[in-house]
Structures are given as structure tokens and as C-alpha cells.
Image (spheres, rainbow, N blue to C red):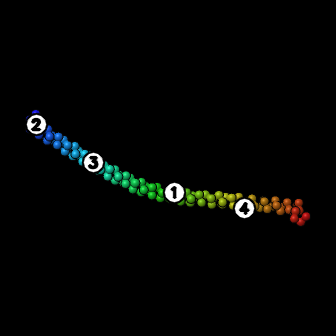
Amino acid sequence: MSLDAIKTIGETEDTVRQMREDAKCRAAQALEEAREAGEAKVAEAMRQAKAESVQVMREAEQNAAKDAVALASNTENKKAAIRARTERTMPAAVAYIVERIVNDGCPLSR
């Protein structure tokens, strides 16, 4: 083998070695860029999730307030209905009690 051939083989090996180093550096750089991009996307997703959760909580609180108002109104309506029924039946109940006391006598006076 001639000296030129050995020299060419050595140069080729050096070139291949340099190409491998360059490829490793480019791969490491691409990996780092991908990691940074991934972290940025995760951070953005977290920011959006927090904003959405704040909005969902705000809507839930508004709906709860509306439901509470409706429930209070419904409760007031039920109270009014019970009060009206009680006022309607009160005279008959009082008359019955008075009649029992008058006809049977007051148990306390015995």
C-alpha cells in the first residue's frame, strides 16, 4: 500500500470521526431544543388549564348563586302555602279544641 493511500485512509477516518462528532453535537442540540419546546408547551398548557379552571369555578359559583336564589324562592313559596293552609284550618281546630274542653270539661279543673 502506498503512502498516499494510507494518508487518504487516515484523512477519511478523520473526516468520518469529525462527521460523527458533528452529528452528535447536532443531535444533542436538537434534543435540547425539543426539550425546551416541550417544556414551553407544558407551561402554556398549565397556564391555559389554570385560566380555564378559574373560569369554570366562576361559572359554577354563579350557577350556585342562581340555584340558591331559586331554592330560597321555592322555600318561601312553600312556607306561604303552609301558612295559608294553617290559617284556613285554624278556626276549625280551635273550635274543636274549645268544644272538647267545654263538653268534656277541662282536665286541669278535675
Q: Are discs 4 and 1 less than 8 Å apart at CB?
A: no
Q: CA distance from mark 4 to mark 1?
A: 36 Å
Mark 1 or mark 2, which has the lower sequence index? Answer: 2
Q: CA distance from mark 2 to mark 3?
A: 34 Å
- Circle number at residue 87: 4
- Circle number at residue 82: none
- 96 relative position to 67: left or right: right
Mark 1 or mark 3, which has the lower sequence index? Answer: 3
Mark 4 or mark 3, which has the lower sequence index? Answer: 3
Q: Residue furthest top?
A: 1
How many residues crowd mark 4 within 10 Å: few (<14), some (14–19), many (20+)? few
Q: Position of residue 89 (x, y in %)?
A: 75, 59
Name which residue type carries label 4.
Glu
Between residues 82 and 72, which one lies in front from this camera angle? 72
Q: Is residue 45 visible?
A: yes
Q: Nearer the viewer, mark 1 or mark 3?
A: 3
- Circle number at residue 63: 1
Q: CA distance from mark 1 to mark 2?
A: 85 Å
Q: Secondary structure at mark 1?
A: helix
Name the residue that disc number 3 marks: 28
Name the residue that disc number 2 marks: 5
Mark 4 or mark 1, which has the lower sequence index? Answer: 1
Mark 2 or mark 4, which has the lower sequence index? Answer: 2
- 44 relative position to 9: left or right: right
Q: Position of residue 93 (x, y in %)?
A: 78, 59
Q: Position of residue 106 (x, y in %)?
A: 87, 63
